[in-house]
Image (cartoon, helix red, strand yellow):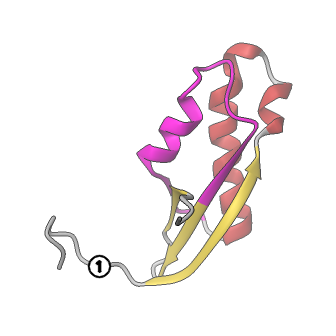
Amino acid sequence: MSKSGEKKEDIVLERIYTIPLKIAYYVPRGKRTPRAVRFLKEFIMKHMKTDKVIITPEVNEILWSRGIQKPPRRIRVRVTKNSEGEVKVYPFMEKE
């Protein structure tokens, strides 16, 4: 048990993806970031072969950082899958 009281998850699979969000720019300007969020979720479902995807608040903040009209063109994420098939998406931070 960690300090926050959460139990330690057993990670079965961990991958790092660079996800192109170019598809979000093919929709009207006011709907781009919601489309980018949906595409991110679809991409993770397809590549990790699961239906349970949780996008962490940090990744959500990166997607929404420039507002609804200008999401990032690509995003680099670290994806983990636990033994129950639940997938969590974290921002990828390179170690220096």
Taking the image as shown, residue 86 lies to the left or right of residue 40, namely left
Name the quadrant of the N terminus.
Answer: bottom left
Please tell me in which quadrant of the rendered image residue 66 appears. Answer: top right
Q: Where in the figure is residue 90, as x and y percent of width and height?
A: 50, 57
Q: Residue at x 76, y 36 (%)?
A: 73
Indicate whether 60 appears above or below 7.
above
Between 19 and 95, the residue placed more toward the observer is 95
Residue positioned most to the right? 26
Q: Amino acid at mark 1?
A: Lys
Q: Which residues are magenta?
A: 51-77
Q: Which residue corresponds to mark 1?
A: 8
Decide if residue 28 is on the left or right side of residue 31: right
User: Is residue 61 on the magenta stretch?
Assistant: yes
Crowd tier of the residue under label 1, counting other residues whose Cα lies within 10 Å: few below 14, some 14–19, many 20 or above: few
Residue depicted at 77% across the width and 32% down the height: 24
Q: Seen in the image, is 72 located left or right of residue 64?
A: right
> Does the segment drawn in magenta span residue 59?
yes
Where disc 1 sits, the SS reads loop
How many numbered circles does the render carry? 1
Give the residue at x 52% y 46%: 59
Residue at the far front in the pictured view: 96
Residue 8: percent from left, percent from top: 29, 79
Q: Quadrant of residue 31?
A: top right
